[in-house]
Image: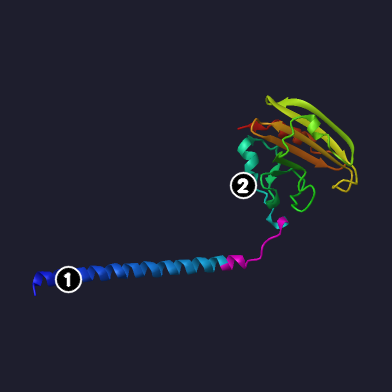
Amino acid sequence: MNPDNDRKYVQVKKVTLLIAALILAALFLGWLLGRSSNSDNASNNNQPQPTSSQQASTTPSTSGEDVKSLVTFKLPDGWTEASCPNAAGSVFIIPAGAGGVDCDANPSAPVKVSVDTSNSDDCNDLQNVQNVSKHICSSLFINDKKTLKAETVYNQDSSYKKATTVQAYYINTGKGIIKVEYVYEGSNEYQTGFDELAKSIAVK
């Protein structure tokens, strides 16, 4: 036999074995990583899940990204943002001294900023309200944007179950309607801050 041919044969055999070993090592490594990932997921799934009240956050989060993709706003001194997992796209505002957000309550917080999915840009759009003792609406401009300002007093037959006032600004950003809402019973102690917040809304 030709020694050169023997050498080539041995080299080809070594290269083939090396490639096979590398493939097996890669498969084994992939299997180990997959097992580790499944184990992590299983342990995460076994963790107790918090209730919606526990999930409430008092720091700005992605739940308000729909609002914040359209506008910016300035909070009055001492006011903070909060969020609820069941109200993605909304930002709950906690006035100074008002306590925290309660995602299971109606309302979850005294003030809320959200995208108005009904696109209300005319007072006639807000006329279809029930279980109310008072409803007024006016049109104005905030930062050169057409805005509706509405006040509705709901009676005890409403979903609030007691006499409750809802004030709201509907600000037309040109990309969507931003609703700034303030809900209270009795005295409206946060009126000044609410108006200040609404008037700080600026379109991005």
Q: Which residue is pictured at 70% across the width and 57% down the height?
A: 54
Disc 2 on helix, strand or loop? helix
Q: Which residue is mark 2?
A: 62
- Tell me: 146 left or right of 15: right
Q: Quadrant of the C terminus?
A: top right
Disc 1 to disc 2, how far (Cα)? 63 Å
Task: State which quadrant residue 135 falls in.
Answer: top right
- Mark 1 Cα within 10 Å, few/some/many (few <14, many 20+)? few
Q: Is residue 46 magenta?
A: yes
Question: What is the three-letter code of the residue carrying label 1?
Answer: Tyr
Viewer-closest of 107 and 66: 66
Viewer-closest of 98 and 2: 2
Q: Which residue is mark 1?
A: 9
Q: Which residue is pictured at 52% across the width and 67% down the height?
A: 38
Residue 101 position, x and y percent, is: 74, 50
Magenta-tinted stretch: 42-52
Q: Is residue 61 visible?
A: no
Q: Is residue 103 visible?
A: yes
Q: How many marks?
A: 2
Task: State which quadrant residue 122 falls in.
Answer: top right
Residue 56 position, x and y percent, is: 69, 53
Residue 55 position, x and y percent, is: 68, 55
- Tell me: 163 left or right of 37: right
Residue 159 position, x and y percent, is: 85, 47
Question: What is the three-letter code of the residue carrying label 2?
Answer: Thr
68 in relation to 145, above or below: below
